[in-house]
Amino acid sequence: MTPATQAYTYAAPSSLVDGRLGLATSGGRALSGPAVAPRFFSGVVTQAAPAAAGLLGVADVALARYHQPQARPGWVRDPVVTCNGDRLRFESFSACGGVYARLDLLNGALDGEVFDRGTTNVDVNAPLREALARIGARYPLHLGVGLDELVVTTMDGAVVEKKVPLPERWLRGFAEVQVIASGMDQRGELTGMAAVRFLRGLPRKGTVWVAQAGRELKVSDRQVPGSVRLAGPNRLGTLLPLLRFAKALRVYGPADAASSAWELELPGMRYTLTLSPERWRGFSGEGAVLDDLATDEAENDADVVGMLLNFEPEVEIGLLADRAGIPADRVRAALTQLGVGGRVGYDLAEAAHFHRELPYDKDNVILLNPRLAKARTLVDAGAVHLEGESATVRTPGGSRRVSLADGSCTCEWWWDHRGSRGPCKHVLAARIVARAAVEVSR
């Protein structure tokens, strides 16, 4: 898959000078409209040390390739920051696409002025990383997200330009992870030193299962009821520098114990890592979004719902359904469609979506999901024949039998994955035709 190119242009490099942290912003979108270098916030970070360590963690994930690590010059992607009014969210994805990181600086950690709400990239350069690593517990820290703060903190005002490959699978990961996270529940919790001991005692390699047992989290080499799958425990490495600030550790997982999410509660903030089911497996191929994208209403509903979003820290589905005049299930499907374009994320602690606008090209949604594109091609070719609760899909490689009831298929994809990575193109095509038949009969 040929990667697109993402260009970052900053008015000056981010810097930390005399306790003033100025984060340079690139192009993005705000409530006030598209902006070349939006200014979102200026004020004091009341908990400087954990905030600096958390920001470094997000930046470290953006640099990491947890599967088959190798040097990739020029592949450094800058974190994304969203100002939701009462909080700042910093996000990144690992280069391998299997780890999603987010630092939420909440209202309790910020004391200052919000100038606008929106999303942009922020420059995290090598000198800034070194300066952030030196911030101590009593370090006074003034944070500015936007150009005006850089006038104070930088000396030369030099324009910074970066061009990096931006694989489509990396973008698809943002969509997949918010759908997967929305199906997770809290599976365990530790507080204080118990959380520290647990994380430091984890093995670095292999696959283990973690389950709550009384007040402890127990590690097992096999799945037990209520357990969460942890493949490649070393992928939790960016949690370790934050342990000295940790108030609690919460573990989230879906009913099928595949992906998992690990949230550290810090003073006035949260740091969350979401891991793919396998160390070698990125989120982009999980297929969690495909059923929602395959509905005929999703694109139109997404246009309506998208116009109602205002960078809220919590998107209330019931309120959106009332305002848009559509059922809640269609709002959820619309949010999935918007998520493919990077326009919504999911906060496990709040159990709610939030609005953001990733500063990337989001016009080719279908192209970011080749399985869906192939399914629509089968539909357009008249290759699907419904037979009650089953269907036959004719392909150049032979006919495939699809069960609409359980989403199974006779193709190699289904036999390899058994639905664990979303529906195959034949099942998607059959569902599209079945939905169309129901609409015609009404």
Image: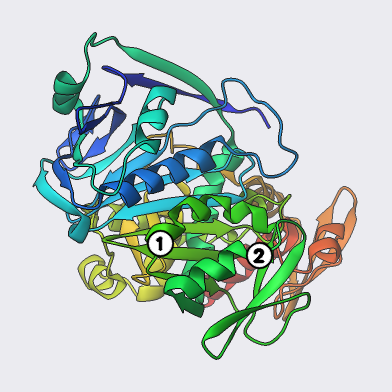
Q: Position of residue 283 (x, y in %)?
A: 61, 52
The residue at the point 19 percent across, 59 percent down is 107
Q: Quadrant of residue 345?
A: bottom left
Q: Position of residue 436 (x, y in %)?
A: 56, 67
Secondary structure beneath label 1? strand
- Depth order, front residue of 293/76: 76
Q: Quadrant of residue 217?
A: bottom right
The residue at the point 79 percent across, 63 percent down is 417
Q: Nearer the viewer, mark 2 or mark 1?
A: 2
Q: Is residue 245 left or right of residue 83?
A: right
**Mark 2 and mark 1: Cα distance apart in space:** 27 Å
Type of the residue with mark 1 = Tyr
Secondary structure beneath label 2? loop
Please tell me which of labels 2 and 1 falls first in the chain: 2
13 in relation to 434, above or below: above
The residue at the point 67 percent across, 70 percent down is 229
Q: Is residue 158 left or right of residue 253?
A: left
Q: Position of residue 134 (x, y in %)?
A: 36, 36
Q: How many neighbours does mark 1 have within 10 angstroms: few (below 14), some (14-19), or many (20 or more)?
A: many
- For label 1, the residue is 346
Q: Position of residue 155 (x, y in %)?
A: 21, 12
Whether residue 286 is visible to the viewer of this picture, yes or no, is: no
Q: Quadrant of residue 129?
A: top left
435 in relation to 50, above or below: below
Q: Which mark is residue 202?
A: 2
Type of the residue with mark 2 = Leu
Q: Is residue 295 left or right of residue 280?
A: left
Residue farthest toward the right in the current orientation of the protein: 398
